[in-house]
Amino acid sequence: MSTLLKSLRGLESRKFVKRFTPIHGNRKMYIQADLIPDPQISGGVWYDGKDFDKEFINILMKITERYVKLKGFAQSGEISEYISSAGVCKTTLRETEINTLLNAMVYDGRLLKVQEESKRREVFTVPMTETSDGRKAGYIGGFLSATPCAGCPRAASCHPGNVSTNPQSCLYIKAWIGGKDFFDIEDGDK
């Protein structure tokens, strides 16, 4: 064994350096023990050694989706705190890693990213689904996804001048403009 390898193993046993394998290539590399290798070299949290960790990512996605369904909507910081408290990660996920996960879920159609104009924040929610009692829950995708009209069963007949259903007398729109939660209004109140 070469003197260099003996020296590296001695440093590794004393916890001065640690060994890692980059995702591209077969060479073992060493780095100071208290540093984290750059994700472009090591693959970051998404890799287990050299292999893309699909199982870990699927677990994170399921936990995130369950949490967002339970809350109705959540910001990335809330989701990050929930994942940390769930104890499924060996390390704490950074904000960029959480955003990567959330964006992948948006692209997969598992979450929707909605800009709340009244509070000037970005939240994530689940796509429109039907609940066990037949009611619609969540948001519908598209550029009007944050408006109450997107999920309204009377939207087709709603127009200015219509006596029974019109935007001027709609309680959902009034609540939405006032920054209130329009999903709490009963259908008979409209």
Image: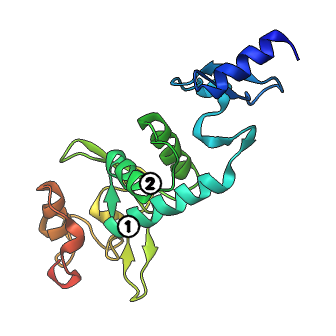
Q: Residue at x 81, y 23 (%)?
A: 27
Residue 59: where, in percent of width, then height? 57, 59
Q: Residues within 10 Å of mark 1 (few under 14, many from 20)?
A: many
Instruction: Depth check: give the residue in front, 150 or 65.
Output: 65
Instruction: Depth check: give the residue in front, 139 or 132.
Output: 132
- Residue identified by numbered label 1: 138
| Mark 1 or mark 2: whose residue is earlier in sequence | 2
Is 117 situated above or below 66?
above
Amino acid residing under circle 1: Gly
The part of the image, by quadrant, that contains residue 137 is bottom left
Callouts 1 and 2 close, C-beta under 8 Å: yes
Q: Secondary structure at mark 2?
A: strand
- Residue identified by numbered label 2: 112
Q: Quadrant of the N terminus?
A: top right
Residue 128: where, in percent of width, then height? 43, 68
Q: Residues within 10 Å of mark 2 (few under 14, many from 20)?
A: many
Instruction: Depth check: give the residue in front, 188 or 74.
Output: 74
Q: Residue at x 38, y 52 (%)?
A: 79
Taking the view exactly as shown, the residue that stands out farthest to the top is 3
Residue 116 in sight here:
yes
